[in-house]
Amino acid sequence: MKGIRTAVAALALSQMPSFAFADADTDELYARAIKLMSESPLIDTHIDLPQIIRGLDRNPLSILPNLAASLPGHVDIPKMREGHLGGAFFTVWAPCADFVGQSYGPNFLGMTEGLRDSLEVLDIIKRMIEQHPNDLSYAYSSSSIKSAFHSGKIASLIGMEGTHLLGNSLSTVRLFAEMGVKYLTLTHTCHSSFAASNGGGGPVEASSHGPGLTEFGKELVGELNRLGVMVDLSHTSDQTTRDAIALSKAPVVWTHAGARAVQDHPRNVPDDILKLIGDGERKNSGIILSVFYPVFIGPTPETANVSRVADHIEHIASIVGRNHVGIASDFDGMYAGVHGLEDASKYPNLIVELLSRGWNDTEIYGVMGENLMRVMDQVDAVKQQMKDELPSTAIWERRNDLPANWGGPEQAYLPYEVRDLVNERIKHDEL
Ligand SMILES: *[C@@H]1O[C@H](CO)[C@@H](O)[C@H](O)[C@H]1NC(C)=O
Ligand SMILES: *[C@@H]1O[C@H](CO)[C@@H](O)[C@H](O)[C@H]1NC(C)=O
């Protein structure tokens, strides 16, 4: 989900140049791409299909059967099958307050219905997988991705986009992890009690708590490591990104971003941050999964095409290595994909493009999904190492509902001894 819509959304697609590979050997490359895609899964780490389902009907679950036939937008089962998609992360997302004309207020205590909404979206994803068992199979690890893929199903994983959805609580993130959320983007386009965002593309006002992670956000990164949830740095401010890389014991991920050196946009990753990622003692062994959103790809939204996506991937790989890159469409979270990658039926075009640039089979398996699965294994290994650590007890310091005042009229629901303690304790306003 890119977030803000721009003027380009109004562009008539019919006015755009048509897409074509110039290479006469394309048929052969296409056949080779399909063969490679049948051997190892292409995993897309960012598909916003749930927001389409939620947006089409007041009763979103009534839309789920349509997925087997056709849905408006970029993604349905026939398109994913035509595109030989091996695995997908479906996104739990609900808008930042300003999208819907509301505000979190300076302490981020407003509009906590994002937590309810994200539970409803998670329910949509789970029911969607459940109701299409011949095509979708729930996965949460590299081994479950591989077994889904080898049984002919699209491995279906869950990512969550934004800490504005957590109700300012680490309890919720622990439960989301238990419910299958495998990555958490540290912000969407708004700041949160955990971290500063880089906004939606235009200038973003400073957060009320500084440019990077809050103390609470630092606790979150440790908690995500402990839970085996991947730390996603798409959308975060550069300082949040640096803070998270410095803190994380596990590899970090960008589930949908490009290279800022190729297209100067705040949603893309700058070279000095890319230099922190890769193989080697001092580097974080994370992964950057390249997005298809035309505004991030460039050179202009109208001319963005599959070759230019490959330019982003190759630039990123020139710094981090071809074993630290991957693929992430942002389908259904943008007005249109780039030329050549218009919807979920088009993934082979990107593999053709990389093959035509001389990427070998090992590198293609890597960019399609092997690199990501290695990162997932490393994240799970960190979880295993931390298995004896207790959960973080941290709370958002600006919450004004804690300690709870739940004793009822005259504290009649409390044992006398507890009532006395509660009456004596320091109240929030006195802290
Ligand atoms: C993408 O656009 C560039 C620049 O216009 C062009 O050179 C290239 O051939 C295009 N790629 C495809 C696959 O059409
Ligand atoms: C592919 O390229 C990588 C370097 O990125 C190299 O290590 C590997 O041996 C190559 N594999 C084949 C099959 O040529």
Image: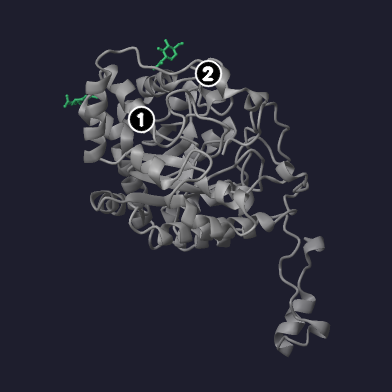
Residue in the foreground of this view, choosing between 239 and 32: 32
Q: Quadrant for ligand 1?
A: top left
Question: In this view of the protein, can residue 282 be seen by the observer?
Answer: no
Question: In this view of the protein, can residue 349 be seen by the observer?
Answer: yes
Could you tell me which secondary element the residue under label 2 belongs to?
Answer: loop
Residue pointed to by mark 2: 298
Give the percent coordinates (x, y) of residue 339: 46, 23
Could you tell me which secondary element the residue under label 1 belongs to?
Answer: loop
Q: Residues within 10 Å of mark 2 (few under 14, many from 20)?
A: many
Residue in the foreground of this view, choosing between 162 and 360: 360
Q: Amino acid at mark 1?
A: Gly
Kindly indicate whether the residue at mark 1 contacts the one at mark 2 (C-beta within 8 angstroms).
Answer: no
Residue pointed to by mark 1: 278
Q: Residue at x 60, y 48 (%)?
A: 163
Left or right of residue 66: residue 190: right
Left or right of residue 48: residue 380: left
Give the percent coordinates (x, y) of residue 416: 74, 89
Q: Amino acid at mark 2?
A: Gly
Q: Residue at x 39, y 31 (%)?
A: 346
Dot 1 beta carbon under 8 Å from ligand 2: no
- Residue 235 vertical placement versus 177 (above, below): above
